[in-house]
Image (cartoon, rainbow, N blue to C red):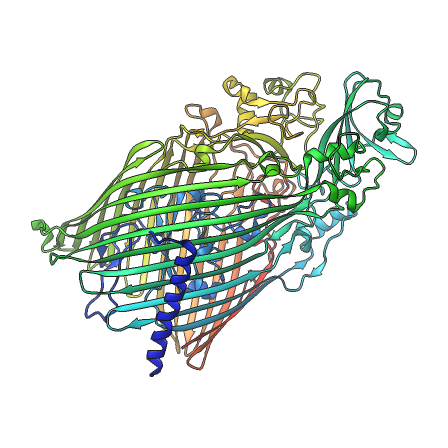
């Protein structure tokens, strides 16, 4: 047997094994659209399908601009998972899943224009990606080893792809024509010099531990990628792949700048009053006492302030993550009329979040002066009430950090066929896709609320079985006492998606006289989609019976169905008219009928023109796009949860005046006496709404592309997206602001603790202070900006120099949270504050020089400056790091990499990103975009070293 035959046989066997294994796991095979291609060598240029249209074209004349990321960029950036590179591009939000911990959904997404991952449609080869537990596409299923390119389509595309394409489309194109065998081994790690004297000085004041000097290699990641592919016979092709990747955890305590939680101003290490030793806050109205008290060897006393716990060091900075992906594409051309195919994708992903230990988070107990556990408290601090409340705040350092372990299994199976439609130059395609995600989430080391009160009171009669007194009163808690209060909470999630898609496309058989012989073409098709979501929680999770989870995780089971009819048409208007080579009109329409909200129409219209031997191109387009409400938004039970931010009526010197705070429910006696939560978290009531209607977005794009000389390509594109009928919430802090400023209609949504006046104590939606912040169709948003791209290549010396540039400028990012009420409107472009972190300008520039068997790549990543101003335009002065210069300065990152081909089969790549080891920009906790004392999206952990060895044969 020849080597080639062996390779082809192996490709087929591996592809069939991967595909068959996935089918066995799934139980059934369903799907969407595809474009089966013949594996025979073409004698002329094959037509290609441009992202954003199903009409085939030999020129990139789509009316919506498409940016492209090539597979070489993954190699030279050291990206071992697709989100590491894609989310660096300026059209996308700076969002890196592995550096999200508390509040993470556990998987990576893509978010165009910062409009939200739920408004970006993520595809693989034009098909929807399985959704994770947050009902957004989980792109961890995409194998970087087999990615051929990534298309980023700006603007709405619902007429082509349906719901969710509000901001645009990110389409991962896989190399389903791969030939041969490829094995890649990768290794990467972070390194940082801990020398931030300011942060270290703040920790010295608190006597906190922190790292110093060279961190060494940490946050290590390893990966192995295998791909095999080849043709069989004269009519078939098979590709299969498997990847394994594992990255280690990186703790906040491994970097000096994240080793303590800064206060809102960034002037001191803050922390939480749920501490060790415990804090005790008493509410004794008759005695007029609303204060902290602490025990000592000589009795109880009133301290200057509570004990503060540094919860930062044990938090994950980079979450650990292990993932295995596999997949296959098998195609076979029976004849020109019938070409069946099977596509499978699979990922098993295990990840964890870890945050500070749980505890008694101001657990309220009713006591009398003769209650044994409080000892001499009444006599020592002057309590005369017959009965009073003690809020106990004790950190469970004896039991260890709270950990959530998640294991997710996602797969997608597509079976379909296509071919020529008779002999009239038309083709057809029909496919059935089934995609499913299963997630098991396990929460450990948290306290069960119903046990805590019993243990705090010394296990009185009727206490739970196995109760041990929780001896916080004398600071004598043992691990056994903590263990008796802990429990395990389990939640199982699943999403199911079924898509049937069928269409025919081809020439209409006529052309306009002005268009020479260029015929009009169109596509007509139907699509049905069914989505289901299930969340099943155990009893303790469903009832919110854990002290450290912020509220219940309710059960949910729901779904919806969508029936659609769509069409597209391309009408050449002019061809070969002097300097005007072509002028095309592009039209699209989709009728959509939701089982939940009824029917809705989307459409598009665009013009594309080419001039002067196709060296210059003009494009303009309009898109009407929609996003239907997802299952959680529709059907979730209303429940209590946390919102990050401060209560402007809390603290000794409240931010708001007495009159403003009285509108929010504060009494004159409470004003100036309401405790502020040092962790900057407060309660809100969230939940679904079955009457939600789809969001609607209108997008205008205008662009110009030019190739004025050989090897030089330039483009500039303007986009304007107006989003109406926004599905979401007003926002807890926005509700407070509106009420305080006289908008009485929203004041009823603020329910303060009747006794203490605060918004954070307790977890009972009936008695705890909270802000009602449930879903609705609220307000509008607008996003405008300009994208720039450029590419140039030339021969220099013994090699070739190439350059590329991608930049994006934000002209507007404005929000109207409340319909018809301009008082709450705000804009974010170029600002950093509690609502925003939006640089106006970002770009990536790359220079690459290749010669002989070697290549060197230098990359410059730029994140523009942001003014430190409030949304009303007034300068802010609170944050220590920003107030001096009044802005967050621009950041420049430089990355260097190189590759060498060793022999004919081995390529070695090595590099370092963030050469200068720049720490992320620091801010205080008062800025809600803050992540571990830093603005999110910047390089969080210092230098990033990477290397890989690829073997192909």
- For the point 41% across and 79% down, which residue is it? 852
Residue extending farthest bottom: 1
Residue extending farthest right: 298
For the N terminus, give its image quadrant. Answer: bottom left
Q: Nearer the viewer, residue 35 or 892?
A: 35
Going by the image, does 757 lie left or right of 224? Answer: right
Going by the image, does 726 lie left or right of 470? Answer: left
- For the point 36% across and 39% down, which residue is it? 721
Q: Position of residue 517 (x, y in %)?
A: 9, 56
- For the point 35% across and 54% down, which residue is it? 29
For the C terminus, give its image quadrant. Answer: bottom left
Number of marks in the rendered image: 0
Residue 895 higher or lower than 130, as above or below: below
Q: Is residue 732 visible?
A: yes
Residue 605 higher or lower than 574, as above or below: above
Task: State the image quarter where residue 561 is shown.
Answer: top left
Q: Position of residue 802 (x, y in %)?
A: 39, 67
Q: Nearer the viewer, residue 389 or 268?
A: 389
Residue 624 higher or lower than 745, as above or below: below
Q: Is residue 934 visible?
A: no
Q: Position of residue 650 (x, y in %)?
A: 67, 27
Task: State the image quarter where residue 338 is shown.
Answer: bottom left
Residue 204 higher or lower than 778, as above or below: below
């Amino acid at each position: 047997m020849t080597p080639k035959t062996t390779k082809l046989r192996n490709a087929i066997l591996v592809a069939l094994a991967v595909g068959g294994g996935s089918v066995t796991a799934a139980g059934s095979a369903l799907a969407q659209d595809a474009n089966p291609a013949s594996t025979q060598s073409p004698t002329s240029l094959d037509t290609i399908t441009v992202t954003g249209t199903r009409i085939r074209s030999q020129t990139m004349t789509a009316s919506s601009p498409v940016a492209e990321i090539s597979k070489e960029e993954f190699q030279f950036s050291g990206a071992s998972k697709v989100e590491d590179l894609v989310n660096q591009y300026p059209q996308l939000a700076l969002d890196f899943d592995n550096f999200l911990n508390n509040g993470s959904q556990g998987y990576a997404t893509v978010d165009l224009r910062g409009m939200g991952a739920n408004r970006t449609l993520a595809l693989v080869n034009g098909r929807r990606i399985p959704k994770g537990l947050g009902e957004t596409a989980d792109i961890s299923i995409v194998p970087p080893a087999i990615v051929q390119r990534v298309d980023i389509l700006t603007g709405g595309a619902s007429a082509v792809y349906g719901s969710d394409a509000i901001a645009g489309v990110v389409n991962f194109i896989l190399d389903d024509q791969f030939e041969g065998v490829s094995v890649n081994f990768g290794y990467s790690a972070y390194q940082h010099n801990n020398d931030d004297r300011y942060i270290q000085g703040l920790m010295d004041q608190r006597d906190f531990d922190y790292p110093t000097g060279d961190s060494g290699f940490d946050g290590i990641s390893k990966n192995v990628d295998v791909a095999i592919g080849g043709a069989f016979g004269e009519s078939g092709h098979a590709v299969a792949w498997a990847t394994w990747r594992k990255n280690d955890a990186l703790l906040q305590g491994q970097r000096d700048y994240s080793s303590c939680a800064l206060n809102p101003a960034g002037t001191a290490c803050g922390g939480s009053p749920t501490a060790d030793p415990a804090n005790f806050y008493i509410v004794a109205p008759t005695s007029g006492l609303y204060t902290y008290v602490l025990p000592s060897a000589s009795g109880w006393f009133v301290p200057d302030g509570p004990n503060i716990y540094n919860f930062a060091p044990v938090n994950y900075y980079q979450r650990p993550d292990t993932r295995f992906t596999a997949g296959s594409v098998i195609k076979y051309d029976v004849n020109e009329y019938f070409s069946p195919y099977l596509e499978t994708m699979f990922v098993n992903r295990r990840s964890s979040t870890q945050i500070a230990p749980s505890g008694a988070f101001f657990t309220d107990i009713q006591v009398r002066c003769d209650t044994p556990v409080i000892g001499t408290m009444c006599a020592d601090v002057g309590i005369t009430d017959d009965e009073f409340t003690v809020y106990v705040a004790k950190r469970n350092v004896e039991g260890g950090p709270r950990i959530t372990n998640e294991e997710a299994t996602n797969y997608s199976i597509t079976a379909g066929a296509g071919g020529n439609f008779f002999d009239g130059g038309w083709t057809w395609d029909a496919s059935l896709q089934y995609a499913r995600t299963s997630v098991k989430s396990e929460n450990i080391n948290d306290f069960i609320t119903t046990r805590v009160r019993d243990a705090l009171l010394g296990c009185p009669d009727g206490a739970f079985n196995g109760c041990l007194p929780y001896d916080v009163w004398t600071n004598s808690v043992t691990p056994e006492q903590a263990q008796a209060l802990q429990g395990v909470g389990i939640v199982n999630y699943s999403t199911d998606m079924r898509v049937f898609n069928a269409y025919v496309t081809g020439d209409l058989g006529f052309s306009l006289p002005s268009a020479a012989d260029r015929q009009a073409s169109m596509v007509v098709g139907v699509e049905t989609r069914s989505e289901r979501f299930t969340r099943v929680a155990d009893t303790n999770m469903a009832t919110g019976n854990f002290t450290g989870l912020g509220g219940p995780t309710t059960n949910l089971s729901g779904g919806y169905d969508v029936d659609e009819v769509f069409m597209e048409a391309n009408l050449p208007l002019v061809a070969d008219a002097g300097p005007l080579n072509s002028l095309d009109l592009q039209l699209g329409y989709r009728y959509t009928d939701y089982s939940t909200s009824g029917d809705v129409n989307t459409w598009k219209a665009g013009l594309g023109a080419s001039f002067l031997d196709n060296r210059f191109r003009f494009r303009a387009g309009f898109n009407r796009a929609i996003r239907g409400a997802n299952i959680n938004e529709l059907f979730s039970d209303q429940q209590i949860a946390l919102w990050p931010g401060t209560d402007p009526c809390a603290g000794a010197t409240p931010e708001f005046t007495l009159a403003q705070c009285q509108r929010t429910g504060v009494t004159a006696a409470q004003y100036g006496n309401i405790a502020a939560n040092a962790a900057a978290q407060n309660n809100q009531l969230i939940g679904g709404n079955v009457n939600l209607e789809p969001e609607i977005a209108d997008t205008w794009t205008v662009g110009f592309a030019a190739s004025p000389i050989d090897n030089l390509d330039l483009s500039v594109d303007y986009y304007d997206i107006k989003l109406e009928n926004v599905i979401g919430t007003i926002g807890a802090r926005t509700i407070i602001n509106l009420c305080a400023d006289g908008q009485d209609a929203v004041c009823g949504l603020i329910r303060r603790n009747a006794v203490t006046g605060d918004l954070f104590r307790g977890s009972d939606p009936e008695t705890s202070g909270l802000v009602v912040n449930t879903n609705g169709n609220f307000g509008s948003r607008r996003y405008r900006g300009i994208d720039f791209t450029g590419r140039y290549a030339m021969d220099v010396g013994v090699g070739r120099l190439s350059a590329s540039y991608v930049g994006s400028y934000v002209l507007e990012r404005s929000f109207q949270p409340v319909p018809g009420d301009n008082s709450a409107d705000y804009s974010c472009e170029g600002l950093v504050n509690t609502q925003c972190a939006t640089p106006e300008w970002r770009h990536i520039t790359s220079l690459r020089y290749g010669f002989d068997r070697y290549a060197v790549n230098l990359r410059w990543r730029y994140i523009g400056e942001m003014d430190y101003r409030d949304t009303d335009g007034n300068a802010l002065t609170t944050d220590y790091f920003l107030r001096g210069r009044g802005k967050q300065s621009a950041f420049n990152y430089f990355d260097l990499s190189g590759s060498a081909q060793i022999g004919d089969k081995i390529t070695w790549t090595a590099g370092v990103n963030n050469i200068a080891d720049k720490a992320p920009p620091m801010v205080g906790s008062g800025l809600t975009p803050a992540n571990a004392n830093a603005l999110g999206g910047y390089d969080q952990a210092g230098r990033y070293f990477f290397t890989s060895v690829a073997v192909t044969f």
